[in-house]
Amino acid sequence: MTALVYVLAVIVGLAAGAVGVGGMLGIGMTWRLPALLPLGGVSLVLDPLAGVFLALVGFAAVPASLYALGDTRRTPRGRVAYLLFVGAMAVVPLAANALTFLLAWELMSLASYVLVMHDRESREAIRAGWVYAVMTHAGVVCLVVGMLLLGTWTGSFEVGAWRAAALAPGARNLVWTLLALGFAVKAGVIPLHVWLPLAHPAAPSHVSALMSGVMIKLGVYGLIRISLDWLGDGPAWWGTAILLAGAVSAVVGVLSAIVDRDLKRVLAFSSIENMGIILIGLGAGVLYHAAGLPALAVLGLTAALYHAVNHAAFKTLLFLGAGAVVHATGTRDMDALGGLIKRMPWTTACFLTGAVAIAALPPLNGFVSEWLTFQALLQNLLIERPGVNLVFALGIAALALTGGLAVACFVRVFGISFLAVPRSDASARAHETEVPPRLAMTMLAVACLALGLGATAVAPALARVGSELIGVVGSLALGDALTLDVSGNFASLSVPVVAVALTLAGLGIVGGLAITGRGRVRRYETWSCGRMLQTPRMEYTATAFANPFKRVFHFFYRPVEQIDIAAHPASRLFVQRIEYANPTRSLFDDWLYRPLLDSVHRSVRVVRVLQSGSANLYLAYILLALLVMLVFA
Amino acid sequence: MLRQLRAALRAGVVTEPGVATESAPLEVVGARLREEIHRRFKRSLHIRQVDAGSCNGCELEISGLTGPHYDFERFGLHLVASPRHADCLLVTGPVTLNMAEPLRRTWEATPDPKFVIAVGDCGRDGGIFRGSYAVVGGVSSVVPVDAIIAGCPPSPAALLAGLLAAIGRRP
């Protein structure tokens, strides 16, 4: 039965992917069922942008469901929620009126909430579920209010009518702000990201793969729709806001990822970082659009879409790999892992592919989309406004810093978790996963490679989607079959040539060593300063790796040193136990959420006076209310 | 701080003037060392120093080599931090029981071709510790020794001369 559900999910995924690709290629479709629901009924429209995200949902659901098929520890709980989750995510990009959209959106949120809470005994999961529910519903409130206002002012809940309506600038800005806040919560934009690092680790791995790979992308989908489509041409500050939010998310996301010890939480923070990169591209596109440079707007949008597709590929892969590791070792703590390359070679190879891709190293896919984002940002001098150029400069700086830190982050994740000697018994006893998860990971690893090497096929296809959305006549020229050319000859990149050059360089080094080294290889134990006893406790740890970053970015992490020494009762010179912790403090918890919650608590305490529990007082309230109503009636 | 400054000013310069002539014995030995190292080791010789239970007398003299007076790096000699980088092991001490195995491992970890110089009377045969229950006795009882620099401790000049002799004897 369980297997059946996941096989069904695979089929749904394949179908959704096929329909999505069809939509991307320009096959438009419309379904209307006005009788099914009030306020305009169900209305689904397939257009190229919806096609991209539908294909994303479909093709990410296939490996995730395959992975779930092989997870022998799975419980029956969460099967229906999983199917609903996939189904709802597939409907969101198609929805063409407010009610369909909001219903699908809410169903997606609720289904994922149930999946986050799958382990109802763990306090961590309960807290994660609670924070997720609060944050996501705060977002939904913004969306509902925004769409209701839009519906009232335009007189229709259909998307087509929103496009046609010409709203006053003030009304448009208000609606955009509300909807953008709602979508930003789902996209995990800093500082609305607090649910993400809690919910992703708590959910089962195939679900966190989908949440991180696809669900948060639907927040980006919403932002693209409101900034470039539903509300018509917007002012420049929309793009500025998106770009700056993206820059902050990228830097803060990667900084948080680099110091965390929990394997899945690192990936969750890295998702925030990648959402930031996508938003930097999108923000650039919106700014160019506002400045009347449609070709560059399409370029920015293409970069954002490309990175969204890429992130779906490698983050799904990394989450499935992390899931395989957690399944084999029973721990997510990187300081208890290590040595997995010998025990799980297949998983290690796939995880390494994903890590190289997400660190944006050529010739994999992450490199191409970050390169495109840079090319989109670097042409900002065509807008002759110093303020806007400053925003772009900040975006470029943030993207560069993020790229460097992301490499360090994934060197740490891969090196500490997979290399060296196992740091715990659980890690030493780890074993390779079953065939379906391996198949799922291999599919995604191949996708990462294909999306990189096939950039000349992918980028123009996404550029076509972008030009369709923005309304540029004719598609953007992006070079020939081997080379990507950006904006004429502003910049060009040929991924296959880079790949061949890298392969040749690697072969050259190996060959050169084989010739000049005369084959003299001696195998001997690792030099360890002549120590007799070599234990895993002497290894480099994830905490130690992160320490330089903690020092350099001290103002951001604000680490606290906690030393707890327990001495023998007879003399303090005999130390029995030393505990050392060096936790970081979240800036957003301390400066944003804690004061907010405190003020809510304070105001609630004031209101509590009204509800004292005395029946007499309540009767007095009723009388008072009656009198007031009589007076005003 | 003012008191310190005053004391420093009152004391004046107390270091001995250096002897920096071309014909000084140190310079002669150094020039020959540089020439030999240049010829045999392609410009530099990397040394890993191993303390196999020494009283640190020899270490004091060896670290004297790195000071401004002897400054042996100008002759192409370098102390390195890992036997993986070394051509030569400079072993001091009578080789205590606890240091015998680390010394053997250090020797194993040094890439071939390599040579070992035992420094000091202890390194030669255990010195005043010879026969003690706690020492193995002499570097040569643990790893093959190519040259010995005797003395308790050998002076930096003796060390340089010994190094020159050890290098010169190699084919």
Image (spheres, coloured by chain):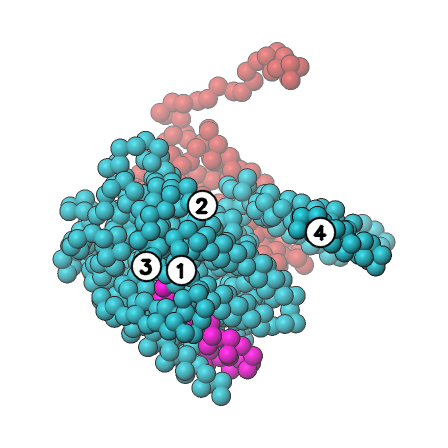
Chain colours: A cyan, B red
Q: Is residue A294 left or right of residue A251?
A: left
Q: The residue tagged with tag 3: helix, strand or loop?
A: helix
Q: CA distance from mark 1 to mark 3?
A: 9 Å
Q: Which chain hosts label 1?
A: A
| Magenta stretch, residue numbers | A67-96
Measured as percent of width and height from the top left, residue A322 is found at 47, 68
Q: The residue tagged with tag 1: helix, strand or loop?
A: loop
In the image, B119 versus A28, the foreground residue is: A28
- Which numbered tag is attached to residue A630? 4
Neighbours of disc 4 within 10 Å: few (<14), some (14-19), many (20+): few
Measured as percent of width and height from the top left, residue A21 is found at 27, 69
| CB-based contact (under 8 Å), mark 3 and mark 4 | no
Dominant SS type (magenta): helix
In the rendered image, residue B164 lying in the magenta stretch gets the answer no
| CB-based contact (under 8 Å), mark 4 and mark 2 | no
In the image, A333 versus A76, the foreground residue is: A76
In the image, A78 versus A523, the foreground residue is: A78
Q: Where B47 falls versus B15 (above or below)?
A: below
Q: Which chain hosts label 3?
A: A
| CB-based contact (under 8 Å), mark 3 and mark 2 | no
Q: How many marks?
A: 4
- Which numbered tag is attached to residue A174? 2
- Which numbered tag is attached to residue A160? 3
Q: Where A427 falls versus A466 (above or below)?
A: below
Q: CA distance from mark 2 to mark 1?
A: 17 Å
Same subunit, labels 1 and 4: the answer reads yes
Q: Amino acid at mark 4?
A: Leu
Q: Which chain hosts label 4?
A: A
Label 3 vs 2, first from the N-terminus: 3
- Which numbered tag is attached to residue A157? 1
Q: Quadrant of residue A53?
A: bottom left
